């Protein structure tokens, strides 16, 4: 397998750029249905059953799913995560493990091993605040995909990602502050995109894209447009559709003229969609509600992109 | 308990600012001793036994340990992690879970829950590239400690953390690039330190310090000095001592006139110290080697700080 090649093929075959976030939540009424919690009790079993039913009912409509590891960790359900990934593969789905890992040296190697060998994910998300040292161990798995956080979907992503930044030529590392005149400044997320572009230069491409992608919140359409122009060979994973407020128009600039270049994630807006229309979808029909929501999301997106 | 209060008390009681990194590695010869691997087989048992012996032989010399979760994940040994933390608490040690988590909303809440409730760590490391949204769910656990990555110990931390950055007053978020004259620029790690200082302003202090700390690599003494001046009320966790090359002189500016303000981590330099002197320390005596190494590290550090 090669992640980006398989992803593009599956996107074309299924005519869909929708990624479904598998974020199991057991705490509140209105998330994983109560009947499953009562029937299976053990969180590992509840979550696996929930995911399997979702996958069974939606795998023909989507190329990829994105489990968020934090929830599996919270419920001590990493075995359910592993089994979910295995099941997704059986049902012809690719899997992006959303874990935003970041570290260096042997630690980063351990995370990459865990992601790609223990959990057997096809791709993952990473945070590159630590620079290329933290990314290289993931790049060693040449056939796997990596999505670097560039501009995240949350409001406070501006705190740091939107700071203006400039690389000053010939400035010594030991200078903490420096006065410059007429320097061109760019925001930190633009600088991060430029780093990704640089790190990806030597990678093998399939239909113009390589395995080093980026994460850009669908909630920031202007930023998406700017980043897209920099990382021409990177797939863009766009979270924030639906529950976080982004619409089909917002993600348009993530795609090229063939409808390639991006995948759009929605998590609770799909998997807990049954809560938004309780009359039509009692808890037992949660997967039908998810299916209907994916079809609707797909239609909206495919109207604005040229897949 | 309150993390920073307990940490300071323990530092004073034990006259030590040494933090030992519990990074179990089973792959190569010369890491966790072969005799333990052969005796216990199951990685969960091997790792727990290794950690327990280390803790038994060193807990009187150190206030805190720092397990790196990546290794436990790699060997599917999260139960060993949980048991190690429980055991460390029994032996009067605080525990910083090194996980560098970063996400937003419900996901960040899940990570915080997992860190503080499932694993029962006293503190953790976080990556704040996503801004305050990702930190708030951790701050909700008021009695727990949080260390934000500011300047990491690895060479490529310069890729992004050393970029020059400026917050331009009145610049709209939608401006991607901007031309400015005579603007004062600061490196990204300085900006990150300023964010931490701001986020910590309202927190309760004990002996001048609150529960929101920073991570600064001991490998960057000048940067440490600059950051220390900004985050006056933050404890500084300094990795990179020993195996990564930092010395006692390098970490001096992390401390105030009472020897408070910092902890210095060494991982493989201590726990696998038996490899550096095989004549004196056969594998069976790995914990003696670790103990000797801690005593030596402590002496070196206590010579330059005024604890």
Image: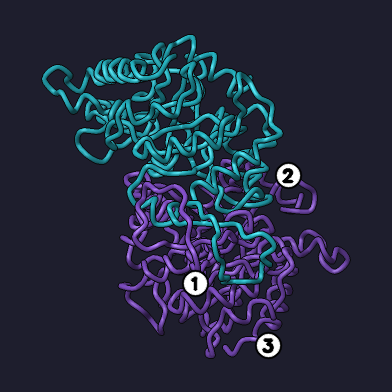
Chain colours: A purple, B cyan
Instruction: Tell me the quarter of the image containing the N terminus of chain B.
Output: top right
Image position of A194 with respect to B154: above or below: below
Same chain under badges 2 and 1? The reply is: yes
Who is closer to the viewer here, A184 or A136?
Answer: A184
Indicate the chain on which mark 3 is placed.
A
What percent of the width, then of the height, locates residue B37? 27, 31
Task: Please tell me which of labels 2 and 3 falls first in the chain.
Answer: 2
Residue shown at the point (65%, 36%) measured from the top left: B200
What percent of the width, then of the height, locates residue A261? 51, 79
Q: How busy is the neighbourhood of tag 1: few (under 14 within 10 Å), some, or many (20 plus)?
A: some
Write down the residue under mark 1.
Answer: A92
Residue shown at the point (66%, 71%) measured from the top left: B174
Indicate the chain on which mark 1 is placed.
A
Same chain under badges 3 and 1? The reply is: yes
Task: Please tell me which of labels 3 and 1 falls first in the chain.
Answer: 1
Write down the residue under mark 3.
Answer: A303
What percent of the width, then of the height, locates residue A246? 71, 71
Q: Residue lying at the far left in this picture: please name it.
A: B279
Q: Secondary structure at mark 2?
A: loop
Q: Nearer the viewer, mark 2 or mark 1?
A: 2
Task: Please tell me which of labels 2 and 1 falls first in the chain.
Answer: 2
Q: Which mark is residue A27?
A: 2
């Amino acid at each position: 397998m090669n992640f980006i090649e398989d992803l593009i093929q599956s996107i074309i075959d299924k005519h869909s750029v929708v990624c479904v976030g598998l974020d199991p939540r057991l705490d509140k009424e209105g998330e994983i249905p109560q009947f499953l919690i009562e029937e299976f009790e053990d969180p590992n079993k509840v979550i696996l059953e929930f995911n399997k039913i979702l996958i069974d009912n939606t795998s023909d409509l989507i190329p990829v799913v994105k489990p968020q590891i934090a929830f599996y960790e919270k419920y001590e359900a990493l075995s359910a995560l592993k089994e979910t990934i295995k099941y997704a593969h059986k049902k012809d789905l690719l899997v992006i493990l959303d874990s935003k890992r970041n570290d260096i040296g042997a630690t980063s190697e351990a995370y990459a091993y865990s992601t790609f060998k223990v959990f057997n994910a096809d791709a993952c998300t990473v945070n590159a605040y630590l620079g290329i040292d933290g990314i290289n161990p993931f790049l060693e798995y040449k056939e796997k995909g990596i999505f670097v956080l560039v501009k995240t979907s949350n409001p406070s992503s501006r705190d740091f990602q939107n700071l203006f930044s400039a690389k000053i030529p010939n400035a010594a590392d030991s200078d903490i502050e420096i006065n410059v005149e007429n320097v061109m400044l760019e925001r930190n997320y633009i600088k991060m995109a430029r780093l990704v572009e640089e790190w990806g230069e030597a990678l093998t491409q399939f239909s113009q894209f390589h395995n080093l992608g980026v994460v850009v919140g669908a909630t920031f359409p202007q930023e998406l447009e700017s980043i897209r122009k920099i990382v021409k060979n990177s797939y863009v994973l766009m979270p924030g559709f639906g529950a976080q407020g982004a619409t089909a128009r917002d993600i348009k600039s993530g795609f090229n003229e063939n409808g390639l270049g991006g995948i759009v994630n929605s998590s609770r807006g799909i998997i807990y969609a049954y809560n938004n229309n309780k009359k039509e979808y009692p808890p037992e029909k949660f997967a039908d509600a998810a299916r209907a929501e994916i079809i609707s999301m797909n239609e909206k997106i495919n109207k604005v992109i040229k897949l």
